[in-house]
Image: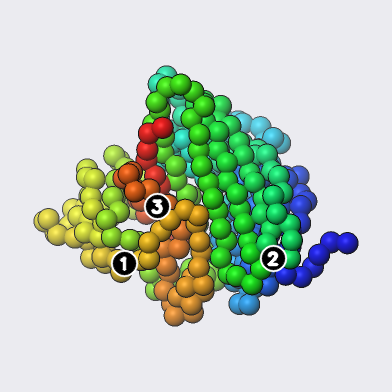
Amino acid sequence: MRRNWAARLRQGTIEGLAAVTLENERLRVTVLPGKGGDVVEFLHKPTDTDLVWLTPRGLRDPREHLQGAPDDVAPFIDHYEGGWQDVFPNGGAPSEYRGARLAQHGEVAGLPWECAVVADSPEEVAVRLSVRTRRLPYRMEKVVRLRSGTAALEIEARATNESGLPLHAMWGQHIVYGLPFLRPGGRIRLPDGVTVIPHETPIAPGGRRVKAGGPWRWPVVPADGGRRGGPERGARARPAERHRLPHRLRRRLVRDHRRGRLPGGVGRHAPALPVDVAGAGRHHGVPLVGSGVHGRS
């Protein structure tokens, strides 16, 4: 008989894609191994608040969508349902590396991942997701875990270079918050010392808020066409707690939400690597914030 109390796990399909739901007394989180390991539900049950935002067109199965005019941007945009994606081995605009053409936001968000249950007890549930990239010789693996009684999702992740050659890669988190959690007056908090690397050209219809060039050191970021040498108004952020692997969306998230604050709740700690935060933009009018790690393996 399927357990319906404490920590529990359910496997099924959504729009024909493999899905797994991890749930406890406080959270319900739905992940899509069938499409990039995307998180499409992150529900705080006591307040009935789902933190993710989903596009109006909803979820599309990449296998059933014919490409009308394939390009380096369409693979991500055509199948983008919102939520939370891993971005690897590159992020942002399309690029080329060692002769391999890499599309916008990399490969893994559009690939099906293997999924195996590694824990299923009233105390905790966990699944292991894994995938191999096709353009570069990487294997990615992450364990998603939810313990009974907690409001924290734990993610332990790693990427392995399976070749004998040193390679560079970018690993980012493409996260979109939505209503009712995100609303006017919310604040984004990031740790001090973050490196801000703007896009070479503006990508938002209204132009850019951050001056081109850099890299800039958060929290002081020059405004584009604004005050000489001064920081953009509102560019300073309150220090956040130390971010580390595994990811933890802590109880503070809910507490800060109730106080009208939006914390920078997800990040990666990489002591030897520079960390960059993707330039803020908007998709269908919703603020978009991402974080990434650049490194060499």
Question: Label 1 is placed on what type of residue?
Answer: Pro
Answer yes or no: is residue 87 visible. yes
Marks 1 and 2 in Cβ contact (< 8 Å): no
Q: In the displayed structure, would residue 240 be above or below residue 87?
A: below
Circle 2 Cα neighbour tier, 10 Å, few/some/many (<14 / 14–19 / ≥20): some
Point out the tag, 3 or 2, that comes first from the N-terminus: 2
The residue at 41%/32% (across/down) is 297
Front: mark 3 or 2: 2
The residue at 38%/34% (across/down) is 296
Q: Determine whether the residue tagged by mark 1 lies in a helix, strand or loop.
A: loop
- Residue tagged by mark 1? 239
Task: For marks 3 and 2, give the CA distance.
Answer: 27 Å
Point out the tag, 1 or 2, that comes first from the N-terminus: 2
Q: Is residue 153 left or right of residue 235?
A: right
Q: Determine whether the residue tagged by mark 2 lies in a helix, strand or loop.
A: loop
Answer yes or no: is residue 40 visible. no
Q: In the displayed structure, would residue 281 be above or below residue 160?
A: below
Q: Is residue 72 left or right of residue 115?
A: left
Furthest-top residue in this view? 99
Color encoding of the figure: rainbow
- Residue tagged by mark 3? 269
The residue at 51%/72% (across/down) is 251
Q: Position of residue 222 (x, y in %)?
A: 20, 55
The residue at 44%/42% (across/down) is 171
- Residue tagged by mark 2? 123
Q: Quadrant of the N terminus?
A: bottom right
Question: Label 2 is placed on what type of residue?
Answer: Glu
